[in-house]
Amino acid sequence: MIQLLSNKKIMTGLVTVLIVIVLIIIAVFLLNNRQSHPITKVFVTTGGEIKSTGDWASIGALDTEKGFQYDLPILADLAIKEGWVKASSCISGEGIYYSKAQEENITLIFDVDENLIGVYQNSDVQMPVPWMKTNGPSKSDGSYIFDKEHYGVYLFILDPSNACDLGTSYDSILASPSGLPSYSIPINVDEAIAQGWPDPIFCSQGRGKYYSNPVFNYIIMYNGDGNPIGIYQYSEESKSAPWWKTKEILSGGLKVVEQEHYGLFIFFADATRACSAGQQKSTKTGSSQSLYLGQGVRATPTPYVEPTPTPEPSTMIPTIIEKLSQLKTIELEVTSDPEGLSSATEIEASEFTSSLTAVLGSLREISYASNTWINNVSYKGIKGITKSDNMTSLVPDALNGKSIEVTVWLAEDGTVKKIKLIGEISGADSNQSARTFNVNIGY
């Protein structure tokens, strides 16, 4: 035995074998204890036909006229196989960014365990809150991943707080880290209702229930169990793929998004049975997000809190009229579609006050309009229908008795910032003629 131990070659071989055995044991331990990806499916889609049989819905191959749909890789090795390239090291509180040449608007974010935890979107055109004008995100050395200023927003499917720690366990989905422009999504329908997202009643097969809030330019989809499964973003600005030009969004025959726009769905859970309840799997851990994490049953919902009601848009009119009565100066910047429509370019403050007060006072079918951006500030809008009789101050050759759609955008204090008139106001107009007045008011 002593002679065997004195043989250096044999000793070296034994040590090597022991090291290999130890490494194998460690590798097996790590593989057995590695967290499986808590999200089973993430995909983007722009719409298309949804074929339904019973409570199942199938969103199949979509032709070029109806948009498209594709999955995002939920593991980093799958992402690499699909052409995604690592764009940064792991950034604390954010994760590891992966980009792809063919994806101009989407960057994926993974944790160090190679789980997809979020999506970063960028846009060359102005986008509504929570999008923010930025140069970021930045790498650990301070340089930027993108080489130009843009509008950006995060959708964190999993909390990125510990993205750079091995073996991170996720007990719930969705996060909105402070300091990063990101979507804040109520964790269930009870929370959504309490935060001013009213129950839409109807459920769309393969999509879910569309919860909307007039304050925000996006829709949250919830399934039959009351869990969030995706968001729908929309913008009236022209957007490149994967965004898709869409006429409107309907649910139960009702218009959820009325105007023509560019839109994009991002789903972070399977939506094929979105309108069926009882989809959660029961397991031992008691996690409340079993649809996504594959464990637990739905927890007892947060006790219902009476929501702060969204004020009726008509209640804003007295505030607008009160602010109009205080104005001293008025400047108008006018555009029209088609170009060259008759419009007043100069007007006395008192005449503007009188005319717009009459128009606002006669509005009917009043509703909220999409917010608009002016100089990087978002302004709330209301709209309604009125007759053209009170519009001669803004359109000198206005006819009487024509139905006109009026949209007014205003600041929080009720100051008018922009007015849009659509309809046949003068004899040369069509019912699609549009006049836009950017308003600069002095008090």
Image: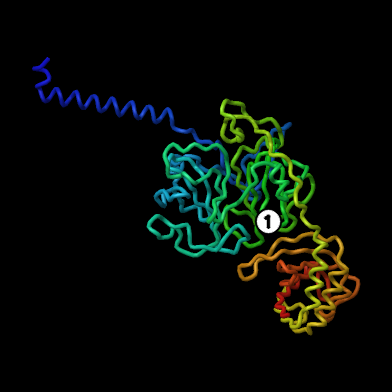
Position of residue 142 measured from the top left corner of the image (x, y, whole percent): 40, 59
**Measured along the vertical axis of the image, is residue 306 above or below residue 238?**
above
Q: Residue at x 63, y 54 (%)?
A: 244
Q: Is residue 351 left or right of residue 125?
A: right
Here the colouring is rainbow
Position of residue 103 measured from the top left corner of the image (x, y, whole percent): 50, 52
Element class at badge 1: loop
Which image quadrant for residue 404? Answer: bottom right
**Measured along the vertical axis of the image, is residue 415 above or below residue 134?**
below
Q: Residue at x 72, y 47 (%)?
A: 194
Instruction: Rate crowding at label 1 as few (under 14), some (14 to 19) or many (20 or more) other CA atoms within 10 Å.
Output: some
Q: Is residue 264 left or right of residue 327?
A: left
Front residue (pair 318, 110) = 318
The residue positioned farthest toward the right in the image shown: 401
Front residue (pair 1, 432) = 1
Q: Is residue 91 visible?
A: yes
Position of residue 88 measured from the top left corner of the image (x, y, whole percent): 41, 52
Count of labels shown? Answer: 1
Q: Residue at x 48, y 47 (%)?
A: 109
Q: Is residue 337 visible?
A: no
The quadrant of the picture occupied by the C terminus is bottom right
Q: Is residue 431 left or right of residue 188?
A: right
**Measured along the vertical axis of the image, is residue 99 above or below residue 416?**
above
The residue positioned farthest toward the top in the image shown: 1
Position of residue 166 measured from the top left corner of the image (x, y, whole percent): 42, 39
The quadrant of the picture occupied by the N terminus is top left
Front residue (pair 298, 50) = 298
Q: Which residue is mark 1?
A: 216
Q: Is residue 266 left or right of residue 74?
A: right
**Measured along the vertical axis of the image, is residue 388 above or below residue 312?**
below
Q: Amino acid at mark 1?
A: Phe
